[in-house]
Image: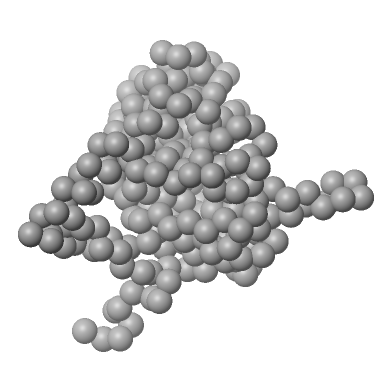
Amino acid sequence: MQNDEWPSVEHIALADGSGLCTFLMIQLKAVNKIVRSGTEDLTILSDVSLEIPEGQFVALTGASGSGKSTLLGLIAGLDAPSSGTITIDGDEITRMSEDDLAEIRSAKIGFVFQSFHLIPSLTAFENVLIPMEIRGLKNGRDRAAELLRDVDLTDRGHHYPAELSGGEQQRVAIARAFANEPKILLADEPTGNLDSKNGRHIFELMTELHKQRAVTLVLVTHDHALAAEAQRQIVLRDGLVESDEFNRRDAETQRTSDQISIG
């Protein structure tokens, strides 16, 4: 094997207890975010360090103003930390140019917002297609049709966002987020503007696509029931990581794997 075939230093292998290794998809080291508010500095995030392996489903929770959306924006490269480093799939993005950050987002990150952010002048099909056209990917139209089929909107592709319900618009947004086959899906309160029935459907759809496509999923949510279904839950409080725990099922699976490997 040639040296350039080995993972970069930041692409650290983690033992998962089963004798297999996964790689860190997201890594934050001592990340701080401070903004100016009037005559004072306001600390949004304080010394946040996190490691999220490839393919993991993480729920990010905490009270309003705890820093959840800010943290998600930093991971996406939509904002820069005041200090600290952020590494995405082996690439440190902290000091990247805007053009390089845009390329990382386009190639590796899908984003689902609470307010959908669909382009109103484009149909549902065109909204899903446009990220692939921007990247010049082949067979974009076939993939857009496949993604709309995955979210059960085959018959609604020719409709404009204003002609779709909130739940349908969010399903289009999810299809669009998966257009460029991202390694990471970031979802900021994707069920927040939906009723409980549609919210549950969107959550199940998103997590099913996460499993099928093996993406790393980071979900910001106020819904404790949804957060409890994640593999791991990180709670922020006043810009600090208050707790970082696996859910009971995954913790038990981890202990069992550790016991088997020791035995």
* Residue visible at 65% across and 58% down in the picture: 32
The image shows residue 226 at horizontal and vertical percentages of 41, 27
Q: Is residue 183 above or below residue 158?
A: below
Looking at this view, is 207 or 168 the one in front?
207
Q: Is residue 132 visible?
A: no
Quadrant into which the N terminus falls: bottom left
The image shows residue 64 at horizontal and vertical percentages of 64, 32
Residue sitting at the far bottom: 2
Looking at this view, is 16 or 139 the one in front?
16
* Residue visible at 90% across and 46% down in the picture: 38
* Residue visible at 12% across and 59% down in the picture: 261
Q: Is residue 30 visible?
A: yes
Q: Is residue 249 above or below residue 115?
A: below
Q: Is residue 69 left or right of residue 18?
A: right
Q: Is residue 197 above or below residue 56?
A: above
Q: Is residue 64 left or right of residue 131?
A: right
The number of numbered discs placed on residues in the rendered structure image is 0
* Residue visible at 30% across and 78% down in the picture: 6
Residue 141, quarter of the rendered image: top left
Residue 93, quarter of the rendered image: bottom right
The image shows residue 19 at horizontal and vertical percentages of 16, 62
Q: How is the image coloured?
A: one colour
The image shows residue 48 at horizontal and vertical percentages of 57, 56
Quadrant into which the C terminus falls: bottom left
Residue sitting at the far left: 263
